[in-house]
Amino acid sequence: MNCPVCGVTYDDDIAIWLAEYGRSLSEPGSLESAYVLSSLGHMHSCVGDAEAAIDPLREALAIQQRELGMQHPVTATSMLHLGFAHGVLGDAAEQLRLAELA
């Protein structure tokens, strides 16, 4: 998995650990934490663990909705990522709902 900031390639487990570590350093509820949570959820999705992706993606989305608003492109992207994870888990209705909101 490639780091979105520096481009370094990490093993999947290390990438997830780094995102968890970043989560511990960010202020809960901040936009910075939303970025970290979104990255963590995305990493879980990339390694095929959609179930583990749901909670961090949901938390990131809640922060982004509060801080950026529903119409912001970052919020819309998070809705799509969360919807994708729901779709992988077989919840097509939630995937469609989030896609329509985005």
Image (spheres, rainbow, N blue to C red):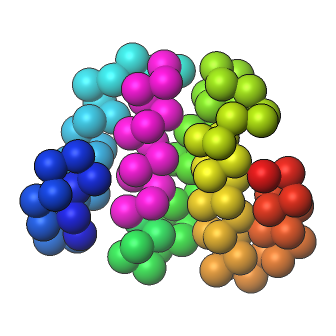
Q: Position of residue 16 (x, y in %)?
A: 27, 57
Q: Is 56 drawn above or below residue 2 in the view shown? A: above
- Picture quadrant where residue 89 is located: bottom right
Identity of the residue drawn at 44% across and 79% down: 48
Q: Indicate left or right for 71 with 60 as reference.
A: right
User: Magenta part of the protein: which range?
Assistant: 30-43
Quadrant occupied by the N terminus: bottom left
Horizontally, is 9 left or right of 13 in the view? left
Is 18 on the left or on the right of 49, as rendered? left
* Residue 36 among those drawn in magenta: yes
Is 36 above or below relative to 41? above
Residue 82 in view:
no
Q: Image point 87% across, 59% down: which residue?
A: 100
Is residue 6 at least partly visible in the picture?
A: yes
Q: Is residue 13 magenta?
A: no
Question: Residue 101 at x, y = what percent?
Answer: 85, 51
Q: Position of residue 41 (x, y in %)?
A: 47, 56
Q: Residue at x 85, y 69 (%)?
A: 96
Residue 95 location, x and y as percent? Answer: 78, 68
In depth, the one of 66 and 70 nearer the eye is 70
* Magenta stretch secondary structure, dominant: helix
Picture quadrant of residue 82: bottom right
